[in-house]
Image (cartoon, grey):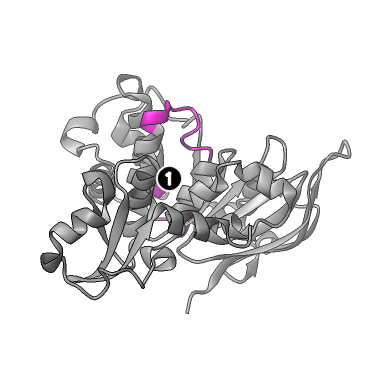
Amino acid sequence: MTSTIIDFENVTKEYPDGTVAIEDISFSVEEGTTTVFVGPSGCGKTTTMKLVNRLEELTSGKIYYDGQEIRSLDKIDLRRNIGYVIQEIGLFDHMTVAENVGMVPTLLEWDRARIDDRVDELLDLMDLPAETYRDQHPMELSGGQRQRVGVARALAADPDVMLMDEPFGALDPITREKLQDEFLEIQAQIDKTILFVTHDIDEALKMGDKIAIYRNGQIVQYDTPKEILTNPANDFVREFIGSDRLIKELKFMTAGDVMDETADVTGKTLSELGAAGVEFARNGQGYLTVERSETTHVALMKIYEGHVEGVLVTEGEEVVGTVTEADLKRNLSEGR
């Protein structure tokens, strides 16, 4: 059973000038998950993150870290368990990559051999082979490489929680997408609890196990990406997601969700079909096969783009249903 590691209870942050950054927010973060804070600029998402490691202090309410109220914890001890990655990266140009990554373990007085081993392990994990990059300086690296070093530094002391404030926001779109994909692979290996701030709803949907959508200092919806796409809480959420909400929803559908089980080819094997499969895919454009449990995004986008007329849904060799553009549109529009 998954346990919560961070709990916000009716938390408000008001600055001395009377500005209320967040007001009466409550939510829980499960251990080993990625929770994304998303919303317009100035809505309170970064303030929420900074409250967790006490870079900002709350005005009222309570925040619990692993069952303990954070104001009862020493700030330094708290931050030792929390890695922090920011958009500007914040690497020290006069230090080598290895010195940057090993900075926190050095402050914690790890022995040199342990630090070196940890640095090499993390650089390799970040696809920055240690033998090539450990002695380079940040100014010798590309933006994407510097961001990888920043993530490695945040992981160096093996924190329980990572805070990531727009970590890929300053990168070009191609590098940004590549790093998103790489980080998802890394997270599958390291299984950290991550709080991730972005203003980009597409990034939030891609990166998050849970998403908190902010508006004017309040959370207007906190749920899984699939639930937010299929059941937006209000017009603000619906508009923030965008007019292509239904297309985004494809990433969370499976072939079994939308298939027609009554087609003539159902019950046959792929090897039996041959010409029947081509006939099913009208105009001789060929057909795709997907497993029932597969997400339908790639295959069904090809239907939309006109590359194929339909999809055969299989379990092993047996065809258990089909998906056409009509099936897709019907399922996307039901209840909308």
Which residue is disc 1 drawn over?
A: 154
| Amino acid, disc 1 | Ala
Image spot of residue 216 (x, y percent): 78, 43
Q: Position of residue 245 (x, y in %)?
A: 56, 47
Q: Position of residue 250 (x, y in %)?
A: 45, 53
> Which residue is more in the foreground, 262 or 221?
262
Q: Is residue 161 left or right of residue 234?
A: left
User: Residue 323 versus residue 144: which sits nearer the camera?
Assistant: 323
Q: Quadrant of the C terminus?
A: bottom right
- Residue at image point 38% right, 56% down: 324
| Residue farthest to the right, as pictured | 18
203 displayed left or right of 94: right
Q: Let me know if residue 219 appears in the view.
A: yes
Does 270 sit above or below residue 98? below
Residue 172 falls within the magenta-colored stretch: yes
Which segment did they paint magenta?
154-175
